Amino acid sequence: MKVLFTGGLGYIGSHTAVEVLNEGFDVVIVDNLSNSKIGVLDTIKKLTGKDVGFYQIDVCDKDALEKVFQENPDIFAVIHFAGYKAVGESVREPLMYYENNMISTFNLLRMMEKYNCKNIIFSSSATVYAQSEIMPLEETFPLAATNPYGRTKLFNEHVLIDYQNVHKDTNVILLRYFNPIGAHDSGLLGEDPNGIPNNLMPYICKVAVGELDHLNVFGNDYKTKDGTGVRDYIHVVDLADGHVKALQKVVREPETGLKIYNLGTGVGYSVLDIVNTFNEVNGDLVKYEIAARRPGDIDECYASSKLAEEEIGFKATKTLADMCRSSYEYQKNNKKK
Ligand code: WQD
């Protein structure tokens, strides 16, 4: 069975491609390399021993996307990762985010309709949830995005839900990721953002290898156990497994319909938990200073993944130590040349 990955050379897409290939599916990747590197394709092939179809195209280019569907008429499912994902950038460039993150989905659904593809798994995000005093977050909790990036994720959810409502024979699975970190055990795949990282773990890794001087902890006056922000960090390979489980569900149950799942661990860790665990596991490499809060950050956010566990057998198994160790291993292998 063939699965089309949009954005498949990115951090989460590439780790998922490895697990999906290892599960016996065929994979075709489309990626415009705007936030990924072509070398990742060979790494995926090397890690799996499998061939992988690849098209360097922009999913917003409808004609280019149609060529992919014409040349791969047997696409069983699409996993839609492609999209810009930097919260701060989305505030500065909202139109760029709405154009890219929405037109890509419109084009995909038009091609799925035209070429009779009946399954889509969408990379959604915890960012679609409204601020909540109650934790852990459940899929039925109120939704409200607070930045253009988050709104594109929320709008995409609505587009997919409304599409499935009139295409009842199409299965739509929305996967709400919490905070993916970590890297493949081989040390050959990992998070490799362009420029200065926005997210915590890639920033910590660059401090650990000496590319950045110290970590700025954005605030220690939150309503949490140690005052620093609490998030649900999930190993990217556990997250990839969640996609395998979702694929297996639509294979097993052709009438799956619409499903929405949180993919997290159910455990919240603070920024200092991450720093301390990283230093325990990898050596005392990360110095930090307390800095001002980052606008838009919330006190805490962690998932209930009970529904995914019950309905698709998803369960995160890797530990925070695994996440810190694998992140650092990859960063060491991937030091700025
Ligand atoms: C985690 C914690 C920061 C950097 C974002 C997106 C979300 C998703 C994951 C795509 C917070 C603190 C961070 C730093 C710090 N992306 N921090 N110093 O903000 O929870 O979620 O990435 O879907 O949509 O919003 O992740 O890693 O940026 O921050 O103290 O240099 O680390 O304040 O408490 P976040 P993050």
Image (cartoon, rainbow, N blue to C red):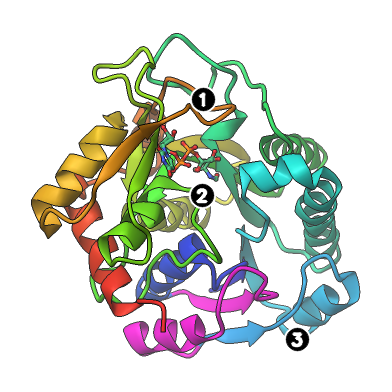
Vertical side of 171 occupied by 70: above or below: below
Q: Secondary structure at mark 3?
A: helix
> Judging from the image, what secondary structure is the residue with disc 2 in?
loop
Q: Which stretch is magenta?
A: 25-51
Which disc number belongs to residue 198? 2
- Mark 2 Cα-neighbour bin, 10 Å: few <14, some 14–19, many ≥20: some
The answer to whether residue 42 is magenta is yes
Per the image, the residue denoted by label 3 is 71
In front of the other: 75 or 131: 131
Three-letter amino acid code at the position of disc 1: Glu
Apparent side of residue 147 relative to residue 333 in the rendered image (left or right): right
Q: Quadrant of residue 328?
A: bottom left
User: Percent x, y for residue 12?
Assistant: 47, 60
Ligand 1 within 8 angstroms of badge 2 C-beta: yes
Q: CA distance from mark 1 to mark 3?
A: 37 Å
Name the residue rendered at 68%, 56% in the picture: 83
At 49% from the left edge and 36% from the top edge, which residue is drawn? 261
